[in-house]
Image (cartoon, coloured by chain):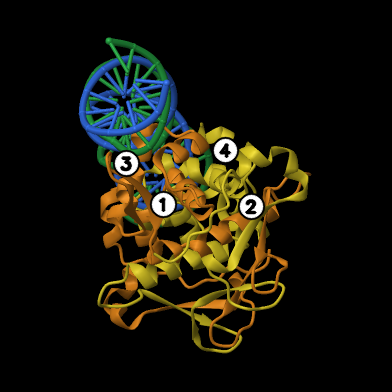
Chain colours: A orange, B yellow, C blue, D green
Amino acid sequence: MRWEELDQEPCSLARTLAVVGDRWTLLILRDCFLGVRRFDEFEKRLGVTRHVLADRLKKLVSHGVLKKMPYQQKPLREEYRLTEKGLDLHTVVLSLVSWGDRHMADERGSPVVHVHKGCGRAMRPLTVCSECGEPVGARDIRVEIGDGWKALEESLLPLHRLPQKG
Amino acid sequence: MRWEELDQEPCSLARTLAVVGDRWTLLILRDCFLGVRRFDEFEKRLGVTRHVLADRLKKLVSHGVLKKMPYQQKPLREEYRLTEKGLDLHTVVLSLVSWGDRHMADERGSPVVHVHKGCGRAMRPLTVCSECGEPVGARDIRVEIGDGWKALEESLLPLHRLPQKG
DNA sequence: CTTGACAGGTTCTGAAATGGAACCTACTGT
DNA sequence: ACAGTAGGTTCCATTTCAGAACCTGTCAAG
Protein backbone atom coordinates (compact mmCIF):
# COMPACT_ATOMS: atom_id res chain seq x y z
CA MET A 1 0.00 0.00 0.00
CA ARG A 2 1.26 3.43 -0.89
CA TRP A 3 0.97 6.47 1.31
CA GLU A 4 -1.08 8.26 -1.33
CA GLU A 5 -3.68 5.49 -1.47
CA LEU A 6 -4.23 5.64 2.25
CA ASP A 7 -6.94 8.32 2.17
CA GLN A 8 -9.09 6.09 -0.06
CA GLU A 9 -9.15 3.22 2.42
CA PRO A 10 -12.50 2.22 3.92
CA CYS A 11 -11.15 3.04 7.37
CA SER A 12 -11.24 6.34 9.21
CA LEU A 13 -8.02 5.55 10.99
CA ALA A 14 -6.18 5.00 7.70
CA ARG A 15 -7.64 8.21 6.33
CA THR A 16 -6.53 10.15 9.36
CA LEU A 17 -3.05 8.67 9.07
CA ALA A 18 -2.93 9.88 5.47
CA VAL A 19 -2.89 13.38 7.01
CA VAL A 20 -1.05 13.02 10.32
CA GLY A 21 0.46 9.53 10.19
CA ASP A 22 4.02 10.69 10.27
CA ARG A 23 6.27 11.45 13.15
CA TRP A 24 7.23 14.96 12.06
CA THR A 25 3.67 15.97 11.27
CA LEU A 26 2.51 15.21 14.79
CA LEU A 27 5.46 17.04 16.33
CA ILE A 28 4.65 20.04 14.13
CA LEU A 29 1.06 19.92 15.35
CA ARG A 30 2.19 19.70 18.95
CA ASP A 31 4.06 22.96 18.45
CA CYS A 32 1.08 24.52 16.70
CA PHE A 33 -0.97 23.85 19.82
CA LEU A 34 1.74 25.57 21.88
CA GLY A 35 1.45 28.66 19.69
CA VAL A 36 4.31 28.19 17.23
CA ARG A 37 3.44 29.71 13.86
CA ARG A 38 6.55 30.50 11.83
CA PHE A 39 8.83 28.42 9.69
CA ASP A 40 12.05 29.22 11.54
CA GLU A 41 10.46 28.67 14.94
CA PHE A 42 9.40 25.19 13.92
CA GLU A 43 12.85 24.56 12.58
CA LYS A 44 14.63 25.63 15.78
CA ARG A 45 12.33 23.72 18.09
CA LEU A 46 12.01 20.49 16.13
CA GLY A 47 15.46 19.88 14.70
CA VAL A 48 13.84 18.79 11.45
CA THR A 49 15.47 19.55 8.12
CA ARG A 50 14.06 22.52 6.26
CA HIS A 51 13.20 20.31 3.32
CA VAL A 52 11.00 17.98 5.33
CA LEU A 53 9.50 20.84 7.31
CA ALA A 54 8.48 22.70 4.15
CA ASP A 55 6.98 19.51 2.73
CA ARG A 56 4.94 18.68 5.86
CA LEU A 57 3.63 22.22 6.25
CA LYS A 58 2.56 22.19 2.62
CA LYS A 59 0.72 18.91 3.12
CA LEU A 60 -1.01 20.14 6.25
CA VAL A 61 -2.15 23.27 4.39
CA SER A 62 -3.40 21.21 1.44
CA HIS A 63 -5.40 19.00 3.82
CA GLY A 64 -6.95 22.06 5.48
CA VAL A 65 -5.37 21.44 8.87
CA LEU A 66 -3.26 24.60 8.73
CA LYS A 67 -3.75 27.81 6.79
CA LYS A 68 -1.24 30.44 5.74
CA MET A 69 -1.97 33.96 6.99
CA PRO A 70 0.07 37.02 6.01
CA TYR A 71 1.40 38.90 9.01
CA GLN A 72 3.34 41.55 7.03
CA GLN A 73 3.71 42.88 3.49
CA LYS A 74 7.01 43.95 1.87
CA PRO A 75 8.35 41.41 1.99
CA LEU A 76 5.35 39.15 2.20
CA ARG A 77 5.64 36.95 5.25
CA GLU A 78 3.10 34.33 6.17
CA GLU A 79 2.54 32.28 9.27
CA TYR A 80 0.85 28.92 9.72
CA ARG A 81 -2.25 28.69 11.86
CA LEU A 82 -4.53 25.88 12.85
CA THR A 83 -7.90 25.83 11.14
CA GLU A 84 -10.99 24.56 12.93
CA LYS A 85 -10.26 21.19 11.38
CA GLY A 86 -6.76 21.39 12.82
CA LEU A 87 -7.94 22.54 16.25
CA ASP A 88 -10.17 19.50 16.24
CA LEU A 89 -7.04 17.34 16.33
CA HIS A 90 -6.45 18.49 19.88
CA THR A 91 -8.05 15.38 21.36
CA VAL A 92 -5.68 13.24 19.29
CA VAL A 93 -2.63 15.10 20.57
CA LEU A 94 -4.00 15.07 24.10
CA SER A 95 -4.58 11.32 24.10
CA LEU A 96 -1.06 10.68 22.76
CA VAL A 97 0.46 12.93 25.42
CA SER A 98 -1.64 11.32 28.12
CA TRP A 99 -0.50 7.83 27.15
CA GLY A 100 3.11 8.99 27.18
CA ASP A 101 2.60 10.51 30.63
CA ARG A 102 1.26 7.23 31.93
CA HIS A 103 3.64 4.79 30.27
CA MET A 104 6.79 6.58 29.14
CA ALA A 105 7.49 9.14 31.90
CA ASP A 106 10.69 9.07 33.91
CA GLU A 107 11.19 10.01 37.58
CA ARG A 108 10.72 13.70 36.82
CA GLY A 109 7.05 13.16 35.97
CA SER A 110 5.07 14.77 33.17
CA PRO A 111 7.01 17.46 31.30
CA VAL A 112 3.89 19.57 30.84
CA VAL A 113 0.68 19.94 32.79
CA HIS A 114 -2.66 20.72 31.16
CA VAL A 115 -4.78 23.17 33.11
CA HIS A 116 -8.49 23.28 32.37
CA LYS A 117 -9.41 26.97 32.14
CA GLY A 118 -13.00 26.16 33.07
CA CYS A 119 -12.29 24.69 36.50
CA GLY A 120 -8.72 25.87 36.97
CA ARG A 121 -7.32 22.48 37.86
CA ALA A 122 -4.59 20.29 36.37
CA MET A 123 -6.43 17.71 34.32
CA ARG A 124 -5.95 14.50 32.40
CA PRO A 125 -8.17 13.82 29.41
CA LEU A 126 -10.86 11.25 30.04
CA THR A 127 -12.66 9.52 27.20
CA VAL A 128 -16.37 9.02 27.79
CA CYS A 129 -19.35 7.71 25.84
CA SER A 130 -21.15 10.52 24.00
CA GLU A 131 -24.51 8.87 24.79
CA CYS A 132 -24.36 7.98 28.47
CA GLY A 133 -21.29 9.87 29.68
CA GLU A 134 -19.60 6.86 31.24
CA PRO A 135 -15.82 6.41 30.82
CA VAL A 136 -14.98 3.88 28.11
CA GLY A 137 -11.98 1.58 27.69
CA ALA A 138 -11.01 -0.97 25.07
CA ARG A 139 -13.18 -3.71 26.61
CA ASP A 140 -16.29 -1.55 26.79
CA ILE A 141 -16.73 -1.19 23.05
CA ARG A 142 -17.98 -3.45 20.29
CA VAL A 143 -17.29 -2.65 16.65
CA GLU A 144 -19.96 -2.95 13.94
CA ILE A 145 -20.09 -2.16 10.25
CA GLY A 146 -21.47 1.24 9.27
CA ASP A 147 -24.72 1.38 7.27
CA GLY A 148 -23.09 2.57 4.07
CA TRP A 149 -20.53 -0.22 4.07
CA LYS A 150 -22.45 -3.49 4.51
CA ALA A 151 -21.48 -4.70 1.04
CA LEU A 152 -17.82 -4.72 1.98
CA GLU A 153 -18.30 -6.48 5.26
CA GLU A 154 -16.03 -9.44 4.65
CA SER A 155 -13.04 -7.44 3.57
CA LEU A 156 -13.53 -4.97 6.38
CA LEU A 157 -13.93 -7.08 9.44
CA PRO A 158 -13.19 -10.77 9.19
CA LEU A 159 -12.84 -10.86 12.94
CA HIS A 160 -14.81 -9.64 15.89
CA ARG A 161 -12.83 -11.18 18.69
CA LEU A 162 -12.28 -8.61 21.36
CA PRO A 163 -9.15 -8.44 23.41
CA GLN A 164 -9.84 -9.99 26.82
CA LYS A 165 -7.78 -10.19 29.97
CA GLY A 166 -4.76 -12.50 29.81
CA MET B 1 16.81 14.14 15.43
CA ARG B 2 16.97 10.39 15.03
CA TRP B 3 14.09 8.02 15.64
CA GLU B 4 16.04 6.30 18.43
CA GLU B 5 16.57 9.55 20.33
CA LEU B 6 12.87 10.31 20.36
CA ASP B 7 12.08 8.41 23.56
CA GLN B 8 14.58 10.57 25.47
CA GLU B 9 12.87 13.83 24.57
CA PRO B 10 11.36 15.90 27.37
CA CYS B 11 7.94 15.53 25.77
CA SER B 12 5.37 12.84 26.31
CA LEU B 13 4.13 13.18 22.76
CA ALA B 14 7.60 12.56 21.34
CA ARG B 15 8.04 9.57 23.63
CA THR B 16 4.73 8.13 22.53
CA LEU B 17 5.70 8.62 18.91
CA ALA B 18 8.89 6.66 19.57
CA VAL B 19 6.55 3.68 20.06
CA VAL B 20 3.61 4.29 17.74
CA GLY B 21 4.72 7.20 15.54
CA ASP B 22 4.68 5.26 12.35
CA ARG B 23 1.88 4.64 9.94
CA TRP B 24 2.15 0.84 9.92
CA THR B 25 2.37 0.57 13.69
CA LEU B 26 -0.95 2.32 14.14
CA LEU B 27 -2.61 0.21 11.47
CA ILE B 28 -1.27 -2.91 13.20
CA LEU B 29 -2.74 -1.68 16.46
CA ARG B 30 -6.07 -0.99 14.81
CA ASP B 31 -6.21 -4.63 13.77
CA CYS B 32 -5.15 -5.77 17.24
CA PHE B 33 -8.19 -3.98 18.63
CA LEU B 34 -10.34 -5.81 16.08
CA GLY B 35 -8.98 -9.13 17.33
CA VAL B 36 -6.25 -9.89 14.82
CA ARG B 37 -3.43 -11.84 16.47
CA ARG B 38 -1.39 -13.75 13.91
CA PHE B 39 1.40 -12.78 11.57
CA ASP B 40 -0.28 -13.94 8.38
CA GLU B 41 -3.59 -12.32 9.30
CA PHE B 42 -1.88 -8.98 9.73
CA GLU B 43 -0.11 -9.48 6.45
CA LYS B 44 -3.31 -10.23 4.51
CA ARG B 45 -5.30 -7.39 6.00
CA LEU B 46 -2.66 -4.68 5.91
CA GLY B 47 -0.83 -5.21 2.65
CA VAL B 48 2.42 -4.47 4.44
CA THR B 49 5.64 -6.24 3.51
CA ARG B 50 6.60 -9.15 5.72
CA HIS B 51 9.89 -7.48 6.52
CA VAL B 52 8.32 -4.32 7.90
CA LEU B 53 5.58 -6.26 9.66
CA ALA B 54 8.11 -8.46 11.48
CA ASP B 55 10.10 -5.38 12.44
CA ARG B 56 7.12 -3.45 13.80
CA LEU B 57 5.75 -6.40 15.75
CA LYS B 58 9.17 -6.91 17.32
CA LYS B 59 9.32 -3.25 18.32
CA LEU B 60 5.83 -3.33 19.80
CA VAL B 61 6.77 -6.41 21.84
CA SER B 62 10.00 -4.80 23.02
CA HIS B 63 8.05 -1.72 24.15
CA GLY B 64 5.58 -3.87 26.06
CA VAL B 65 2.58 -2.95 23.90
CA LEU B 66 2.14 -6.49 22.57
CA LYS B 67 3.22 -9.82 24.00
CA LYS B 68 3.82 -13.13 22.28
CA MET B 69 1.70 -16.02 23.54
CA PRO B 70 2.12 -19.63 22.37
CA TYR B 71 -1.10 -21.12 21.05
CA GLN B 72 0.38 -24.48 19.99
CA GLN B 73 3.52 -26.58 20.40
CA LYS B 74 5.15 -28.68 17.68
CA PRO B 75 5.76 -26.57 15.82
CA LEU B 76 5.80 -23.69 18.24
CA ARG B 77 3.38 -21.03 17.08
CA GLU B 78 2.87 -17.75 18.85
CA GLU B 79 0.33 -15.01 18.53
CA TYR B 80 0.52 -11.34 19.38
CA ARG B 81 -1.77 -9.94 22.03
CA LEU B 82 -2.25 -6.52 23.49
CA THR B 83 -0.89 -6.02 26.99
CA GLU B 84 -2.60 -3.67 29.44
CA LYS B 85 -0.22 -0.99 28.21
CA GLY B 86 -1.36 -1.73 24.69
CA LEU B 87 -5.06 -1.80 25.57
CA ASP B 88 -4.52 1.62 27.08
CA LEU B 89 -3.79 2.93 23.57
CA HIS B 90 -7.46 2.46 22.75
CA THR B 91 -8.27 6.11 23.43
CA VAL B 92 -5.55 7.13 20.96
CA VAL B 93 -6.96 4.90 18.24
CA LEU B 94 -10.49 6.01 19.05
CA SER B 95 -9.64 9.70 18.80
CA LEU B 96 -7.88 9.18 15.46
CA VAL B 97 -10.86 7.25 14.10
CA SER B 98 -13.26 9.84 15.39
CA TRP B 99 -11.39 12.69 13.68
CA GLY B 100 -11.39 10.71 10.44
CA ASP B 101 -15.12 10.13 10.76
CA ARG B 102 -15.71 13.85 11.16
CA HIS B 103 -13.29 15.21 8.57
CA MET B 104 -12.36 12.53 6.08
CA ALA B 105 -15.57 10.53 5.56
CA ASP B 106 -17.25 10.25 2.16
CA GLU B 107 -20.97 10.01 1.36
CA ARG B 108 -21.18 6.48 2.72
CA GLY B 109 -20.53 7.69 6.26
CA SER B 110 -18.39 6.04 8.91
CA PRO B 111 -17.04 2.63 7.89
CA VAL B 112 -17.40 1.28 11.41
CA VAL B 113 -19.64 2.12 14.32
CA HIS B 114 -18.57 1.83 17.94
CA VAL B 115 -21.23 0.43 20.24
CA HIS B 116 -20.86 1.05 23.96
CA LYS B 117 -21.61 -2.25 25.67
CA GLY B 118 -22.63 -0.43 28.83
CA CYS B 119 -25.52 1.51 27.34
CA GLY B 120 -25.97 -0.38 24.08
CA ARG B 121 -25.88 2.70 21.86
CA ALA B 122 -23.67 3.79 18.98
CA MET B 123 -21.23 6.27 20.50
CA ARG B 124 -18.58 8.78 19.63
CA PRO B 125 -15.70 9.33 22.04
CA LEU B 126 -15.94 12.55 24.01
CA THR B 127 -12.92 14.00 25.78
CA VAL B 128 -13.71 15.51 29.17
CA CYS B 129 -11.78 17.02 32.05
CA SER B 130 -10.84 14.40 34.66
CA GLU B 131 -11.49 16.93 37.43
CA CYS B 132 -14.81 18.54 36.57
CA GLY B 133 -16.19 16.26 33.85
CA GLU B 134 -16.81 19.06 31.36
CA PRO B 135 -15.95 18.46 27.66
CA VAL B 136 -12.66 20.08 26.69
CA GLY B 137 -11.40 21.44 23.36
CA ALA B 138 -8.18 23.07 22.27
CA ARG B 139 -9.22 26.51 23.54
CA ASP B 140 -10.20 25.24 27.00
CA ILE B 141 -6.71 24.22 28.03
CA ARG B 142 -3.61 26.09 29.15
CA VAL B 143 -0.23 24.37 29.16
CA GLU B 144 2.24 24.73 32.07
CA ILE B 145 5.60 23.21 32.88
CA GLY B 146 5.60 20.13 35.10
CA ASP B 147 7.22 20.35 38.54
CA GLY B 148 10.17 18.14 37.67
CA TRP B 149 11.06 20.17 34.59
CA LYS B 150 11.23 23.82 35.68
CA ALA B 151 14.97 24.02 34.96
CA LEU B 152 14.40 23.33 31.29
CA GLU B 153 11.62 25.84 30.91
CA GLU B 154 13.13 27.94 28.14
CA SER B 155 13.91 25.09 25.83
CA LEU B 156 10.55 23.45 26.47
CA LEU B 157 8.06 26.23 26.03
CA PRO B 158 9.27 29.47 24.53
CA LEU B 159 5.72 30.32 23.68
CA HIS B 160 2.39 30.24 25.39
CA ARG B 161 0.24 31.83 22.76
CA LEU B 162 -2.93 29.88 22.41
CA PRO B 163 -4.67 29.42 19.10
CA GLN B 164 -7.62 31.77 18.92
CA LYS B 165 -10.42 32.16 16.42
CA GLY B 166 -9.44 33.55 13.04
C1' DC C 1 9.14 -41.36 0.92
C1' DT C 2 8.32 -37.71 -1.99
C1' DT C 3 5.47 -33.84 -2.80
C1' DG C 4 2.89 -30.07 -1.28
C1' DA C 5 1.12 -26.89 2.05
C1' DC C 6 1.41 -23.76 5.94
C1' DA C 7 3.08 -20.55 9.68
C1' DG C 8 6.43 -17.47 10.57
C1' DG C 9 9.80 -15.54 9.45
C1' DT C 10 14.91 -13.74 6.88
C1' DT C 11 17.63 -12.19 2.81
C1' DC C 12 18.24 -9.70 -1.39
C1' DT C 13 17.79 -5.62 -4.62
C1' DG C 14 16.14 -1.36 -6.58
C1' DA C 15 13.13 2.71 -5.38
C1' DA C 16 11.78 6.31 -2.24
C1' DA C 17 12.35 9.22 1.78
C1' DT C 18 15.47 11.51 4.90
C1' DG C 19 19.50 14.26 6.91
C1' DG C 20 22.89 17.71 6.29
C1' DA C 21 24.62 21.35 4.07
C1' DA C 22 24.80 24.94 0.62
C1' DC C 23 22.42 28.14 -2.19
C1' DC C 24 18.64 31.59 -3.60
C1' DT C 25 15.43 35.71 -3.15
C1' DA C 26 13.33 39.69 -1.30
C1' DC C 27 13.73 42.95 1.75
C1' DT C 28 15.78 45.95 5.96
C1' DG C 29 19.09 48.19 8.73
C1' DT C 30 23.92 50.53 9.26
C1' DA D 1 28.29 48.18 0.11
C1' DC D 2 27.60 44.77 3.34
C1' DA D 3 25.51 41.90 6.73
C1' DG D 4 21.28 40.00 8.51
C1' DT D 5 16.68 37.78 8.31
C1' DA D 6 12.54 34.99 6.78
C1' DG D 7 11.32 31.50 4.05
C1' DG D 8 12.31 28.63 1.27
C1' DT D 9 14.83 25.23 -2.87
C1' DT D 10 18.63 22.27 -4.66
C1' DC D 11 22.09 18.72 -4.26
C1' DC D 12 24.02 14.39 -2.60
C1' DA D 13 25.04 10.52 0.63
C1' DT D 14 22.67 7.60 3.85
C1' DT D 15 18.64 5.21 5.61
C1' DT D 16 14.39 3.05 5.07
C1' DC D 17 10.93 0.71 2.35
C1' DA D 18 8.45 -2.33 -1.24
C1' DG D 19 8.46 -6.43 -3.67
C1' DA D 20 9.91 -10.72 -4.35
C1' DA D 21 12.42 -14.91 -3.39
C1' DC D 22 14.16 -18.00 -0.08
C1' DC D 23 14.51 -20.73 4.50
C1' DT D 24 12.89 -23.85 8.48
C1' DG D 25 10.03 -27.04 10.97
C1' DT D 26 6.00 -29.63 10.89
C1' DC D 27 2.05 -32.15 9.13
C1' DA D 28 -0.90 -34.57 5.62
C1' DA D 29 -1.76 -36.85 1.14
C1' DG D 30 -0.55 -39.88 -2.57
Pointer 4 residue: B6
User: Mark 3 is on which residue type?
Assistant: Asp
The numbered mark 3 sits on a residue in which chain?
Answer: A
Q: Earlier in the sequence, mark 3 or mark 1?
A: 1
For the residues beneath circles 1 and 4, the answer to whether they share a chain is no
Q: Is residue B93 left or right of residue A60?
A: right
Up the image or down, B139 lies above or below B149; here it is below
- Is residue A47 at all visible to an observer of this figure? yes
The answer to whether mark 1 and mark 2 are in CB contact below 8 A is no
Q: Earlier in the sequence, mark 1 or mark 2?
A: 1
Categorize mark 3 by other alpha carbons within 10 Å: few (<14), some (14-19), many (20+).
few
Quarter of the image for the C terminus of chain A: give it.
bottom right
The numbered mark 4 sits on a residue in which chain?
Answer: B
Pointer 2 residue: A100
For the residues beneath circles 3 and 1, the answer to whether they share a chain is yes
The numbered mark 1 sits on a residue in which chain?
Answer: A
Question: Element under label 3?
Answer: helix
Camera-side residue: B89 or A97?
A97
Residue at point 47% right, 63% down?
B164
For the residues beneath circles 3 and 2, the answer to whether they share a chain is yes
Cα separation between marks 4 and 2: 12 Å
Q: Earlier in the sequence, mark 3 or mark 2?
A: 3
Pointer 3 residue: A55
User: Mark 1 is on which residue type?
Assistant: Gly
Residue at point 51% right, 88% down?
B121
Categorize mark 4 by other alpha carbons within 10 Å: few (<14), some (14-19), many (20+).
many
Cα separation between marks 3 and 1: 14 Å
The answer to whether mark 3 and mark 1 are in CB contact below 8 A is no
Cα separation between marks 1 and 4: 16 Å
Question: Element under label 2?
Answer: helix
